[in-house]
């Protein structure tokens, strides 16, 4: 057991492990922001689930982009529109599309069975979390291998400081 713990600790302290931990923490923050926004927009403002999910996902994507770029991947300087911003938002829109589909199903299911808007909100939030959870691992791979990739001539734990990404020019 000590060997497993030691191996896990060694892996977590590696550059890739630290990056994965930071990405996970950013994801937790983004989920919390998105879910709070979804509760406010769906439950308090009484929007339908689909538009509420689109608005809430947009709100959560803003801290997600900046925290991932600056903290998890250590990128500095101006964001590159075509190499970083556009691909990030494309992935965000993919997540939004999938989660909007699932919250629509969750809302239909919940409104057919429950009169309580609070219970309906729980189903809508659950649909949103489930959809983004499915895409979470794929996004990490894309962020790590393409979007915020550091270049081979650099050390593993030193980010590209000139704004370069893994996407060829």
Image (cartoon, rainbow, N blue to C red):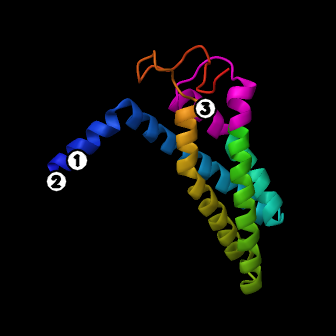
Label 2 – label 1 distance at C-alpha: 6 Å
Q: Residue at x 41, y 34 (%)?
A: 16
Above or below for 112 versus 91: below
Label 3 – label 1 distance at C-alpha: 31 Å
Q: Would residue 75 be visible to someone looking at this image? A: yes
Disc 2 element:
loop
Nearer to us: label 3 or label 2 = 3
Name the residue carrying label 1. 5
Coordinates of residue 11 in the picture (x, y in percent)? 31, 38
- Farthest residue to the front: give it: 168
Name the residue carrying label 2. 1
Nearer to us: label 3 or label 1 = 3
- Farthest residue to the left: give it: 2
Name the residue carrying label 3. 147
Other residues around mark 3 within 10 Å, as few (<14) / some (14–19) / many (≥20): many
Disc 3 element:
helix
Disc 1 element:
helix
Write down the quadrant of residue 125 in the picture.
Answer: bottom right
Q: The magenta stretch spans which residues?
A: 62-87
Coordinates of residue 27 in the picture (x, y in percent)? 55, 46
Coordinates of residue 144 in the picture (x, y in percent)? 52, 35
Q: Are marks 2 and 1 in contact (CB under 8 Å)?
A: yes
Q: Residue at x 71, y 50 (%)?
A: 94
Q: Main secondary structure of the magenta part?
A: helix
Is 30 displayed left or right of 55 in the figure? left
- Frontmost residue, 146 versus 1: 146
Above or below for 111 versus 139: below
Q: Quadrant of the C terminus?
A: top right
Other residues around mark 1 within 10 Å, as few (<14) / some (14–19) / many (≥20): few
- Frontmost residue, 121 versus 51: 51
């Amino acid at each position: 057991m000590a060997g497993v713990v030691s191996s896990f600790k060694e892996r977590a302290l590696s550059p890739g492990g630290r990056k994965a931990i930071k990405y996970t923490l950013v994801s937790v923050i983004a989920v919390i922001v998105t879910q709070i926004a979804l509760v406010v927009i769906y439950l308090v403002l009484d929007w339908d689930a689909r538009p509420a999910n689109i608005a809430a996902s947009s709100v959560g994507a803003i801290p997600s982009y900046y925290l991932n770029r600056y903290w998890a991947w250590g990128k500095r300087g101006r964001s590159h529109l075509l190499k970083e911003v556009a691909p990030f938002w494309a992935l965000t829109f993919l997540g939004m599309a999938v989660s909007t589909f699932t919250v629509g199903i969750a809302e239909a299911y919940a409104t057919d069975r429950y009169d309580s808007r609070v219970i309906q909100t729980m189903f809508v939030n659950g649909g949103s979390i489930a959809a983004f959870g499915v895409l979470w691992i794929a996004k990490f791979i894309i962020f790590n291998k393409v979007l915020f990739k550091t270049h081979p001539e650099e050390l593993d734990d030193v980010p590209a400081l000139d704004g370069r990404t893994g996407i060829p020019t």
